[in-house]
Image: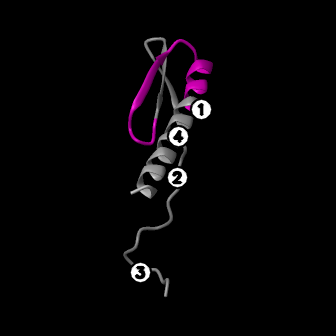
Amino acid sequence: MFGKRNDDPGASTHFRSERVSVVNGQFFFTTREGTLEGPFFSREEALNQIDRYLERLQTAQGLLRQSVSNV
């Protein structure tokens, strides 16, 4: 049963926020974990570093899964 109660909140709109921001002429990106990464000298460098950051996270998750399965 997946009914909606009268006091349930209505549907909401979710917005994607821009990951790259500029502070004092330097570029930073924010992560889902709530960290601010940077500074970088250009927007392109910040965007490239987002990809590198995600690669590092995936590698770390793989290593963690490996170590847990070996226990």
Q: Which residue is mark 1?
A: 51
Q: Can you give x and y, in whole percent of width and height, for residue 27 in the image?
A: 50, 19
Q: Can you give x and y, in whole percent of width and height, for residue 39 in the image?
A: 45, 17
Tell me the residue at 41%/55% (across/down): 68
Mark 1 Cα within 10 Å, few/some/many (few <14, many 20+)? few
**Whether residue 62 is situated above or below residue 47 in the rendered picture:** below
Q: Nearer the viewer, residue 14 or 55?
A: 55
Tell me the residue at 51%/35% (across/down): 56
Q: Which residue is mark 3?
A: 5
Q: Can you give x and y, in whole percent of width and height, for residue 67 in the image?
A: 43, 50
Q: Which residue is mark 4?
A: 59
Q: Secondary structure at mark 4?
A: helix
| Whether label 4 touches label 2, CB < 8 Å | no
Q: Is residue 51 left or right of residue 5?
A: right
Quick check: is 44 in the magenta stretch? Answer: yes
Q: Amino acid at mark 3?
A: Arg
User: Which badge, 1 or 3, is on the more N-terminal residue?
Assistant: 3
User: Which badge, 4 or 1, is on the more N-terminal residue?
Assistant: 1
Mark 3 Cα within 10 Å, few/some/many (few <14, many 20+)? few
Q: Amino acid at mark 2?
A: His
Q: CA distance from mark 4 to mark 1?
A: 12 Å
User: Which badge, 2 or 3, is on the more N-terminal residue?
Assistant: 3
Q: CA distance from mark 1 to mark 2?
A: 23 Å
